[in-house]
Image (tube, helix red, strand yellow):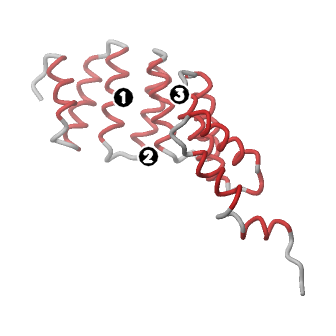
């Protein structure tokens, strides 16, 4: 009987045992558990798909963010984006962290990517509008909030943001 190469066995067992546990742990709600699981996925390197490693960096970024380690989370999302440059969620998460750090220019750049990748998702416009407001660029903020309402007319939060800026939604 022909013996299977080690990589074929690992692939076949990918949905069981320690490999599956790492995936499950990577997506855990407990940040420390998530970091451990994602680190295991990332360390598997060439035995994982590029997308799986990118997502592991993303989940690890979420975990670091939950722990209040914003700069470390930003670095994780940057690694995720490097591996999966069309992931609007990773740009949105990193942009939110930049905005939290009051790095509005970087936040707006990331939200521009969110909008480019997912133009029919109102959240990108709202997030970018908040970043513009953080820079006191209220005309641009209002334009983004209005665009978000065109996409999602029932969004009460965005209507409230416009009212706070003295604009009728």
What kind of element bears circle 3? Answer: helix
Q: Nearer the viewer, residue 89 or 24?
A: 24
Q: Spatial distance from mark 1 to mark 3, Cα to Cα?
A: 20 Å
Pointer 3: what residue?
Answer: 65
Measuring from the top left, give residue 46's x and y in whole percent: 77, 54
Measuring from the top left, give residue 67's x and y in whole percent: 55, 25
Q: Nearer the viewer, mark 1 or mark 3?
A: 3
Q: Residues within 10 Å of mark 3 (few under 14, many from 20)?
A: many
On screen, residue 125 versus residue 69, left or right, reads left
Determine which of the numbered discs, if any, sits on residue 68 in the image.
none
Q: Residue at x 25, y 20 (%)?
A: 139
Pointer 1: what residue?
Answer: 128
The mark nearer the N terminus, 2 or 1, is: 2
The mark nearer the N terminus, 1 or 3, is: 3
Rendered view: 136 above or below 48: above
Measuring from the top left, give residue 120's x and y in whole percent: 31, 47
What kind of element bears circle 2? Answer: helix
Measuring from the top left, give residue 158's x and y in whole percent: 21, 30
Q: Residue at x 36, y 28 (%)?
A: 128
């Amino acid at each position: 009987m022909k013996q299977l190469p080690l990589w074929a066995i690992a692939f076949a067992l990918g949905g069981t045992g320690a490999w599956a546990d790492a995936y499950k742990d990577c997506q855990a709600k407990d940040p420390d558990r998530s970091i451990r699981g994602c680190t295991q996925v990332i360390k598997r390197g060439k035995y994982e798909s590029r997308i799986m490693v990118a997502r592991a960096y993303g989940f690890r970024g979420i975990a670091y963010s939950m722990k209040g380690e914003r700069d470390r989370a930003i670095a994780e999302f940057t690694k995720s984006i490097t591996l999966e440059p069309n992931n609007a969620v990773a740009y949105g998460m990193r942009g939110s962290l930049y905005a939290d750090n009051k790095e509005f220019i970087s936040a707006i750049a990331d939200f521009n990517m969110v909008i480019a990748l997912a133009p029919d998702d109102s959240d990108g416009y709202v997030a970018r509008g908040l970043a513009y407001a953080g820079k006191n660029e209220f005309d641009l903020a209002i334009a983004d909030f209005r665009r978000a309402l065109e996409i999602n007319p029932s969004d009460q939060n965005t209507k409230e943001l416009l009212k706070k800026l003295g604009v009728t939604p």
